[in-house]
Amino acid sequence: MDLSTLSKETLISIIDDLQNEISKLKNEYEKRMTAIENKTNNIMKTYEKNEQKNKVEKKKKEEENEQKQKRISKLPYIKFATNNLSEVLVDPKGARCVYCMGSPLITEDTDTNDINTIICPDCTIDAVVPASCVPNEETLKGWHQLGFGGKSNKIKPFKIDDNCNVWYMNGNVSELDNWEIHIKNNYVTTWNNNGKNDSVESKIKTGDIIAWYIVSKGYNSILKVIDSPHKITDENFKLTMTEEQIKNKKECMKYYNYSIVTIPVEFLATTTTNFIKKGHINDYTGEWSGGLRGSHCIKPNNSQWKELVVQIYNNLKIV
């Protein structure tokens, strides 16, 4: 365009239009920047809030652990039960367990923690001592009372009605990182890949029992369903994730075509350390079911399944 041919009034009008357009663009830019800043501030506030919450919870756990360690350090048998594999192996009387008060067979292949603290093969508790250190049964009972308060004798009876559905379900090890949050908010989650696990929402009913098995670990919970399963909500996500993590999770779910199902439950018995596997239940000689595949809710083909679940509950309450 040859501007020299335009009148002064026309040029002024063009300039005004350009200035108006510039003002509009500037306003839009400022609005977008304000929105971005607000979103960033909200994310940072959420992050800081979560960080503060985590710090408080971490400090609380540290204080609880410190108190627990102080109490444990005062137990009269603790020096015999710590890093003791070599001492037990050479003890002519063998071993005794302060927790189950049995006489477990200890070998070089027995599971240990710390450096070489023996884990009782009968009850999976690290309270084994050389038998020669136990002067009599009354002493052993006294140690048990001091260390465990007679917990093993105070199990609330657990009965399953004949008409009650009792399901087997798998959970992942990674879920244990947020297990206290699950317990506090009464829920567990499972996944539904390409609709292959749609039946979870229709099969599981209020009042049903679920035996929860952590893959590669063992049973860690007996649960009672307290409401209908449903697709996971933003409120559930926010319990363990930041806004950015939730956004990424939803994009991932959409891309791989899967969903997450929330199951509202009461934790009747649970643990994050002492998992129940085959051979851990001393007084159960029936058929074992565990380590099954998939995220589906399953009723194992086991005529003694309900009896096994009761025994798992009892052992979880002990540990």
Image (cartoon, rainbow, N blue to C red):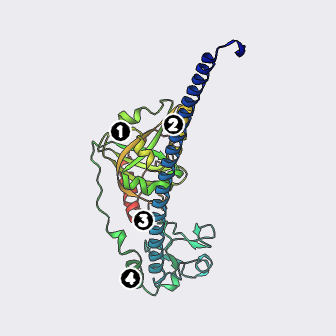
**Residue denoted by label 2:** 31
The quarter holding residue 21 reads top right
Helix, strand or loop for disc 4: helix
Q: Position of residue 284 (x, y in %)?
A: 41, 57
Number of the front mark, 3 or 1? 1
Helix, strand or loop for disc 1: loop
CB atoms of marks 3 and 2 within 8 Å: no
The residue sitting at 55% across, 78% down in the picture is 82
Of the numbered discs 4 and 3, the one sitting upstream in the chain is 4
Of the numbered discs 2 and 4, the one sitting upstream in the chain is 2
> Real-space Cα distance between discs 1 and 2?
48 Å
* Mark identifier at residue 142: 4
Vertical placement of residue 227 versus 117, above or below: above
Which quarter shows the C terminus? bottom left
> Real-space Cα distance between discs 4 and 3?
18 Å
Of the numbered discs 1 and 2, the one sitting upstream in the chain is 2
CB atoms of marks 4 and 3 within 8 Å: no
Which amino acid, mark 2? Lys
CB atoms of marks 1 and 4 within 8 Å: no
Of the numbered discs 3 and 2, the one sitting upstream in the chain is 2
**Residue denoted by label 3:** 319
> Real-space Cα distance between discs 3 and 2?
58 Å
| Left or right position of 313 against 191 | left
